[in-house]
Amino acid sequence: MAVLAACGDAAPKASAYRIGSLDDAIGGPHAIGTIGDFMLENDQIRVVIADTGINTRDPSKTTYGRVNTTFGGTLVDADIRRPGGGGGRGNDQLAELLPGFAFSVINPTKVEITADGTDGKPAEVTVYGTGGDLLQMVYLLNVGLLNAVNLDFKQTYRLHPGQKWVELETTIRNKTNGAHPLPYFQPAEIKDLGFDIPGLESLTLSVPMGMLPLLGGEQDLFAPGAAGFNVQYAIEDTYKTAGGFPAFPGMVVDYLASRGEGVSYGLTLPASPNNYVNKYKTLPSGAPGYPQQDITPYSMLLPFTYAGVAGVYMYAPPSQLNAGEEFTYVSYFVVGDGDVSSVLDSIYTIRGIETGTFGGRVLDEHSQAPVAGADVMILDGQGRPIDQIETDARGAFLGRLAPGDYSYAVYADNREPTIPASITITAGKQTGALVNMPSPATLAVVVRDEQGRSAPAKIQLIGRFDQANQNKDPRTFLYSLARGESRRPTAFDGGNRFVEKAWWTKDGRQLATVRPGTYDLVVSRGPEYELTTKSIKLEAGKLVTEQLTLEPAFTTPGWVAGDFHLHAAPSTDSGLPIIDRVISCAAEGLEVAIATDHNYITDYAPAIAASGLDPWLLGIPGMELTTFEMGHFIGFPLKIDPGSTRGGEFVWHQQPPQSLIDQLRNLAVDSATAIVQVAHPRQQVLGYFAQFFVDDQTALPYTPSGILGVFAPYGDEFSADKFSVDFDAIELLTGRRTEDVHTFRAPNPLPPGPFPDPQPVPGQVVLGPDGRAKFPGVAETWFTMLDKGHRATALGASDSHSLLGHEPGYARTLVFVGDGKDVPGGFTRDDVVTAVREHRAITTNGPFIDMKVGTATIGDTVQGASIELVIRVRAPSWAKVDKLTVYSNSAIVTPTPITIPTDQGTDFETRITLRPTRDAWVVAEVTGTSNMFPVVSPTEFPPLDATVIIQALSVGLGDGLATLPLIASLKPERVHISTPFAMTNPIWIDFDSNGTWTPPKSPFATRRAPTTTTTTTRPDVRTQFDALPEVAP
Amino acid sequence: MTQRAHGLALSLASVVAIGVLALTSRPAWGHTFPPVRTVVLQVERCELVALVGYRAGTGDAADKLLARVASRPKSQALEAMRDVLASHAMTPLTIAVDGVALVPTAVRAKLGVDGEGGRPMVVLLVSYALPAGKTLALSSRDARSTRISWTDRQSGRVAIPEAPAQGRWFTGVASFLLNLTPSGGSACATSKSSD
């Protein structure tokens, strides 16, 4: 038999080469590969491995932190090979993939092509390096577990021709002449270091190794079984049943995958005797390490995940590496074409599993039109998701499955799901299904404002669920995150309202298909408008049209509303297209939108112009300079460098705060007037003030006691002398986190204890063992800065990364741009910047506070020893306020707090006379208790909480950890409805009219702090020795 | 859609939470204090200078130390204390180039008392000639008590990109390695240098 080969057919090849032109790069929403990085590609997929970033000729140009994590040598871009995808027009949505060794990573010294593929064999790129700390906060832990300083690391990325996955071969080598135990220290030795944990000496520790995939904000993580697409909460559920050490707590998964628009990713590994989960599935005590979890030969452990970022522990190294000994492990990174099924297909191939196919079409039950973009969820015998297949434009779907009995159901957000149906898959055979899916209803809405204009507006459908389900977790009955359904926020107030759908429109028009039902149609446009509501009934297959008019609630002459902290697709953890971001801002009544993507300078202007929003919205380019442990800093207005893959060049790794601030000013359009803003200053790990342990009474860093003191300062750049106050603004309220505004006080009555000493007193500030506020507030810290004469402007911002559930503009800042200028086209970017510099700003998530002394207003200085403050508060009826508090020089001014009568909750005015005895500042604050749903979603589910992690870790330690202060029940409540809040910036009072404002407290010694952390300034040890005093006879 | 985070670090913060909270502690009051040895290695073109500090532990360790001092004549008590502490400080340490231990060219010691607990402590300045070689290693047989930091004074002797970070403390390290540059040391005299 002759084998005929078509003329021109060439065998598939893989190749590795250095990127020499941006046309060679992949491109896409999260692509950061650039010239000098390494391309690894074949006929199926393309991936990019970043260079080291180290510039050996000029170390000052070393670019640590160019990628998402600290070091280079990681896999940063990945896409399928697609027609027309060349020239940087690909669809990379991967943030980054890197190997992890407990909490250490590779600090690369060299990246090279070890096989270029020209011989027809696999192409390879190899990274060599030493150990690096992913987070300096845990560097001591890294020493205790791994002690990477005496290890060499190697990572080989290998791509075979014709395959849709990259083989990852990771090696660690003991480069010393002695044995290297793993973990490096035994628990008793760790205890000798000072970590006195009760029961620690009886533990057996382990050193998990694997990968750290950052799959990107556009990707939805999927794990087969109990999790499905509900990975984050499923992991938290496993903490409750953790078996205890040496089995690290977390969720056991057979593989990890994701779904996204046009590309998807996955991770798996081969069966191995070193498999971490299998090694610890039975503890030394005989108890199960992972009770109630399914374990397979391919199991991996997910200890945590958050928005597409996951830790994946795969292997357990030997208990000891002898001199020169190596340990190598293998995993596979799969690239799919958008759904989980395309990833699972490759995993079946990797595992050599025989499969059958399941395919068919999904059609509308009435019209028989194809249903595109629906999710065919494959369920196991327990009804748990094990695969997801997306229908194409013709409603068709096809996927491979291992032989067995399954069921399937089809989901689409605008239709009721189908009832699960059973199928049986046989190896080598095809199984088909023609699915009729319930029809949606069609809704057409036109919204006009009070002037008859087609204005941007938000349109929502508010449904009501069965009252029998009140107070139940909506994830158990209203929607299934595991099966890929969208979250539907509820009112979270004991009632039964929920948001079925929300649209942010650029012109008040919306045509959409939705699930049939009876709803309230609600339209809004931010706090300056009331809600317009109409009950409607939507039936399957039928069209309903409505026209509604927005009713203004109040006006803010001279003031415009801005959101000074926004994310969109250029941020690794946001999948929101820029055009959707700008439309959402306008629809929420914002007039200014500052683009602040993570380590990326974004310009909203093109999207604003393309959507016709120029009359409504002003975009200002900015960036959130994002570090791991130093905090986040925002700068605007910034220039855009088209030659940079990030819009500008900067370094964030191991930089002291002054360097970060200076870099932002150097990136600005005008460094002399640019605004540098501290983002979420009190947020744990992400907040600048939190990371420097800034005291709210001194506004200066201190070294905490206990374990925090052991870890602090984490590095030279965290030393107290590096704390800089050279910023112009701070976020007083970020998002819906009103609990962070003020220093936390014990509630009355106290919840059940136990409580560590000092014992809390109802109404009093909760103190830590060092006598300082345990949860200091942003406001109190800002007040102290004002007392010291540091005039940082307080701002409100949303830090929004998405839409529903994290709406832009809540919080926001009202800035005074000038009388008559608050009209479309009436103000400029410079007017906004000037307003911030002059402190003419109000932090708010709804109410408007107009505060005056005569004709002087917020940001002005007045003179006199008797001052009459005129305060007028306006609010929409859905954000009524009920309390007014006035602060001056960090103290509450009597007769406030004032209870605002209920009938004046939307319009309240009062006059307060101040008689300061020294120069002073004064601010006004209003709060309310009304639920701002549906305009602002509540925080229904707690963020990843250390409490659940501690409970998992404490298994095996007896009651030891349970008594530690960190899991005490007395802490700010993170789960709550969203209630009204606003606070002004100060009016300053020159009480003795001498023309000088004297701060009531001693000012900061200096505004700027040192910028260098190089050790060339380290003194000669001889000099140090000579200077030491000695005990003499 | 799954909920979105704000910042990569938050996810890594959960790693921190797992790690840090696994090792939370109570203050160590009421317990004995272990000894502490700090070593700063300063690499120069032809010389290595080590600043070694040693603070004695409390409990049995202190009792034995005092017993040895008490066995010497009273007029030599301070000198005896200094010598005994210096011995404790240096005995577990070995500095070697390519496995060959270096011999100090100069040793100076000062005796003091730490400001916190009044425990005796010694500080030594030890100089070594730095020959050519591939690897400079500091080994400690008492890793638990030893903290090591190093600094390069533009010596041209150390392969900086491959070296551990300068100016940072490494705790519990039994063997601390620095790769030496191939061309370094050739211009250095082999006789011991003065301090």
Image (cartoon, coloured by chain):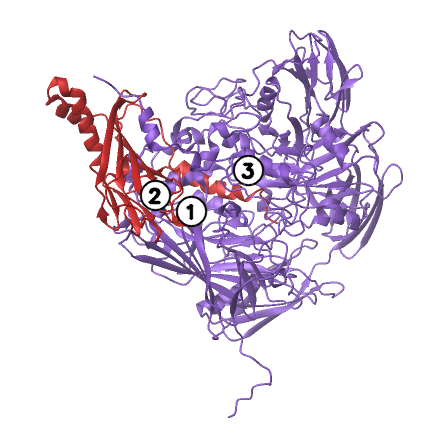
Secondary structure found at label 3: loop
| Disc 1 to disc 3, C-alpha distance | 32 Å
Classify A196 as above or below A77: above
Is B154 located above or below residue A812 in the figure? Answer: below
Is residue A603 shown left or right of residue B40? right
Chain in purple colour:
A
**Marks 2 and 3 on same chain:** no
Earlier-in-chain disc, 1 versus 3: 1
Report in which chain the residue with disc 2 lies. B
Kindly report the distance in space between the C-alpha atoms of the residues bearing marks 2 and 3: 57 Å
Measure how far apart labels 1 and 2 are at the Cα level. 27 Å
| Other residues around mark 1 within 10 Å, as few (<14) / some (14–19) / many (≥20) | many
Residue A794 in the image: state x and y as whole percent.
65, 27
The chain holding disc 1 is: A
Chain letter for the red part:
B
Instruction: Indicate the amino acid at tag 1.
Output: Gly
Q: Which residue is disc 3 drawn over?
A: A942
Q: Amino acid at mark 2?
A: Arg
State the image quarter where residue A787 is shown: top right
Instruction: Give the labeled residue for mark 1.
Output: A132
- Residue ID at (48%, 21%): A772
Which residue matches tag 2? B45
Q: Secondary structure at mark 2?
A: loop
- Residue A715 % position (x, y): 44, 36
- Asked if residue A576 can be seen in this view, the reply is yes
Q: How many marks?
A: 3
Would you say the residues marked 1 and 2 are in contact, meaning their CB atoms lie under 8 Å apart? no
**A431 shown above or below A270:** below
The answer to whether residue A936 is seen in the rendering is no
Q: Residues within 10 Å of mark 2 (few under 14, many from 20)?
A: some
- At label 3, the amino acid type is Pro
